[in-house]
Amino acid sequence: MTLMYIVAATFLGGVVSVAMAAAISAPLLSLIVRHLVSLSTGVLLGTALLHVLPEAFEGGEPPQALFLTLLGGLMFFFLLEKAELYRHGHHHEHDDHHHHHGFDAEQAGRGGWSVLVGDSIHNFCDGVLIAAAFLADPHLGLVTAVAIIAHEIPQEVGDYIVLVNAGFTRTRALVYNMISGMAAVVGGVLGYYLIAPWEAYLPYMMVVAASSFVYVAVADLIPQLQKRLSWRDTAIQIFWLAAGLLMIWSIVGQLHGSEEGHGHGHGHDHAHEAVQAPAGVGASGASSALAR
């Protein structure tokens, strides 16, 4: 059952988001992309800081080790992006980023295929993170998947338009983006089988997932929001960012209420069935690494 959840979540995040991006017309795109970026910023920060990190820190691991993992994760994604293997830009023509006309066509023309390679690696990493989250706790997996799907839609909008500007036909850009999106499913399935024997390290994997969300929000999305706007546009921007935070806060609150209603720890039983405790670790020790 856990594997089915992982496949469904990664398929939605990696493939359906591409189709949704391609279905958005150019006029509508210019109206909603900035709002989507604000919304996904709130969703990513809310997921990382309100749910994933608290879950990881309640596992009983040394805080210093978890903070070191968080720092290492941020540096890892920074270096991965420097190598152009973790691209998650959202730029497109007429996006008010003050690039000269044809900027995206030049960028994609010089490395259109690197866009697809980088996006595939990004999607694969997202799939692994979703698998780790579902193995730790189905509820945590659900919130993580929501965050990734919300973030993927504006990202795929940007990638799709960059490829079209580079000379790809709309059909070809859609097909290649969907193939790239399938890397998330591959990452999720491989993650399910490779992570399961390492349940004691799941809190650290959750911290790595959180570092990915924080890095994308702080290094990519927030800089796009930091420009001079009218008071009205600033208010709208803050509204959508707050909506993302409130959405995650509401989901987390409902999940906690559900757990309390069914008894503490009951929601983790299915996740524990998917993994076996390492040799020499008792049942209580294994569950403490994951259970809240």
Image (cartoon, grey):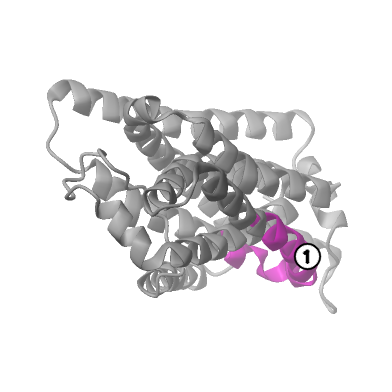
Report the amino acid beneath label 1: Ala
Span colored in magenta: 184-206
Q: Nearer the viewer, residue 200 or 161?
A: 161
Residue 199 belongs to the span the image colors magenta: yes
Answer whether residue 124 is visible to the viewer in this image.
yes
Q: Position of residue 181 (x, y in %)?
A: 61, 53
Residue drawn at x 77%, y 45% as measured from the top left? 5
Answer whether residue 291 is visible to the viewer in this image.
no
User: Badge 1: few (under 14), some or many (20 or more) residues near its Cα, within 10 Å?
Assistant: some
Residue furthest to the bottom in view is 280
Q: Position of residue 221 (x, y in %)?
A: 33, 47
Q: Quadrant of residue 286?
A: bottom right
Q: Nearer the viewer, residue 203 or 96?
A: 96
Q: Nearer the viewer, residue 192 or 105?
A: 105
48 lies left or right of 3: left
Q: Nearer the viewer, residue 130 or 35?
A: 35
Residue named by callout 1: 286
Q: Position of residue 127 (x, y in %)?
A: 64, 57
Residue drawn at x 41%, y 27% as measured from the top left? 243
- Count the marks: how many? 1
Residue 282 belongs to the span the image colors magenta: no
Residue 83's place in the image compared with 181, above or below, is below
At mark 1, the secondary structure is helix
Q: Quadrant of residue 108?
A: bottom left
Q: Position of residue 83 (x, y in %)?
A: 39, 75
57 lies left or right of 86: right
Q: Quadrant of residue 176?
A: bottom right
97 lies left or right of 173: left
